[in-house]
């Protein structure tokens, strides 16, 4: 037979009492006699009764659940952010339900609908790379359901958000390349409509300007945020008459794919081409050479996103706060050239 969870009704029917009496007994309500309370608790243990927080929450119109949507569930970046969200959620007595958009706008819309159907109290979201229209979040905004964006955010909305200072980070990368003797610095960007692409591109251009280097449009290549497209972008850079002596990827996935392509062309990292990533995934330390990358305070990002979420819950109103966290450039072998 198919097993199912034991409910309060099952316990009540077996004991011949009301559901409310069983509920009160399990909570040690003094209006229930000690004898009956003991009897109810013993049966609950015998039948392996586990309280259903969703059912209890629906009765209170408060499910204590937060929906979290991320572009993927594989990348350490997102799992670390989720860990930060979960840390604060646990302190507040909340649970989280996680969905992945798989970088698809349609899947993201579907995830929003499915999570709302499960009666989550609000959403914490990192948008997919396909998302340039935010109409599917209007239902939450209009009904004042708590909503927070992190990392990739919907700009020009009244939704609170947590990001990092991507512009300053990209500027620091460009300056780091320049100090290591690089003069043809290339940047493999992401889709233009994403805030992370815009800000890192701005930092790259400002970095070139501060270093007295002229911007060369051939050295700025847009790609989708996947390894296949990053490989194509790298091939395009390596096919130039004058190849770059440094490449900066918008994230580590791009940088890893670029590293593989550079090696395929018989070039050495960093001697021929210095390389820097962004997000500092675990693999940054195990590839050869170890990848210089920008470390995000990912767990703090998750905790800040959760803080903004609970602030809306507690104040029972939408807030507009943009939290911008600093980053740290971790220099490893892939970008450090021995100047002759």
Image (cartoon, grey):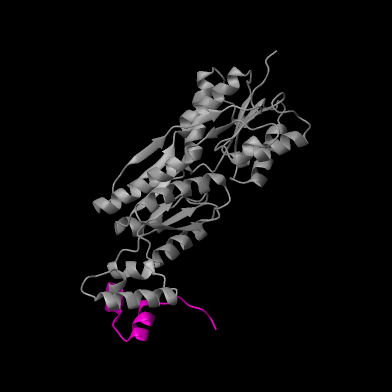
- Please say whether residue 132 is one of the residues in the magenta stretch: no
**Residue lying at 50% horizontally and 19% vertically, measured from the top left:** 210
Image quadrant holding the N terminus, namely bottom right
- Residue 20 in view, yes or no: no
> Vertical placement of 144 versus 301: above or below?
below
Q: Is residue 297 left or right of residue 160?
A: right
Magenta segment boundaries in residue numbering: 1-24
Task: Pick whichever, 64 or 234, lies toward us.
Answer: 64
Q: Residue furthest left?
A: 31
Coordinates of residue 20 in the picture (x, y in percent): 27, 77
Seen as rendered, the residue at the extreme front is 35
| Residue 72 on image: x %, y % | 55, 52
Picture coordinates of residue 177, whole percent (x, y): 60, 23
**Residue at 42% across / 48% down in the picture?**
87
68, above or below 163, in the image: below
Tally of numbered discs: 0
Residue 275 seen anywhere in this rendered image of the structure: yes
Is residue 145 rendered to the left or right of residue 202? left
Q: Residue at x 67, y 40 (%)?
A: 257
Q: Quadrant of residue 5?
A: bottom left
Q: Residue at x 53, y 81 (%)?
A: 2
Asked which quadrant contains residue 136, the reply is bottom left
| Residue 23 among magenta residues | yes
């Amino acid at each position: 037979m198919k097993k199912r969870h034991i409910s309060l009704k099952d316990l009540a029917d077996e004991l011949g009492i009301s559901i409310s009496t069983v509920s009160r007994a399990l909570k040690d309500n003094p209006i229930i006699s000690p004898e009956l309370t003991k009897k109810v608790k013993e049966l609950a243990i015998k039948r392996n009764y586990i309280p259903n927080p969703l059912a209890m929450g629906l009765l209170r119109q408060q499910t204590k659940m937060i929906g979290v949507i991320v572009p993927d569930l594989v990348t350490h970046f997102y799992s670390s952010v989720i860990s930060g969200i979960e840390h604060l959620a646990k302190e507040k007595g909340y649970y989280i339900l996680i969905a992945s958009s798989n970088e698809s706008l349609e899947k993201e819309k579907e995830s929003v609908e499915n999570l709302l159907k499960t009666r989550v109290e609000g959403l914490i979201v990192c948008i997919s790379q396909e998302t340039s229209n935010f109409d599917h979040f209007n239902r939450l905004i209009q009904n004042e359901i708590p909503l927070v964006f992190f990392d990739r955010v919907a700009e020009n909305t009244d939704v609170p958000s947590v990001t990092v200072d991507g512009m300053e980070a990209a500027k620091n990368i460009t300056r780091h390349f320049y100090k290591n003797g690089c003069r043809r610095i290339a940047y493999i960007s992401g889709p233009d409509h994403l805030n992370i692409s815009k800000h890192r591109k701005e930092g790259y251009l400002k970095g070139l300007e501060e270093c007295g280097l002229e911007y060369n449009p051939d050295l700025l290549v847009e790609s989708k945020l996947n390894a296949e497209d990053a490989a194509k972008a790298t091939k395009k850079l390596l096919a130039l008459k004058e190849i770059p002596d440094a490449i900066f990827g918008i994230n580590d996935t791009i940088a890893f794919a670029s590293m593989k392509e550079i090696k395929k062309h018989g070039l050495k990292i960093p001697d021929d081409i210095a390389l820097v990533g962004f997000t500092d995934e675990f693999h940054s330390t195990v590839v050869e050479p170890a990848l210089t990358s920008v470390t995000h305070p990912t767990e703090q990002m998750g905790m800040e996103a959760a803080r903004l979420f609970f602030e809306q819950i507690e104040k029972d109103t939408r807030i507009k706060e943009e939290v911008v966290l600093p980053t740290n450039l971790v220099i490893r072998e892939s970008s450090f050239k021995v100047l002759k």
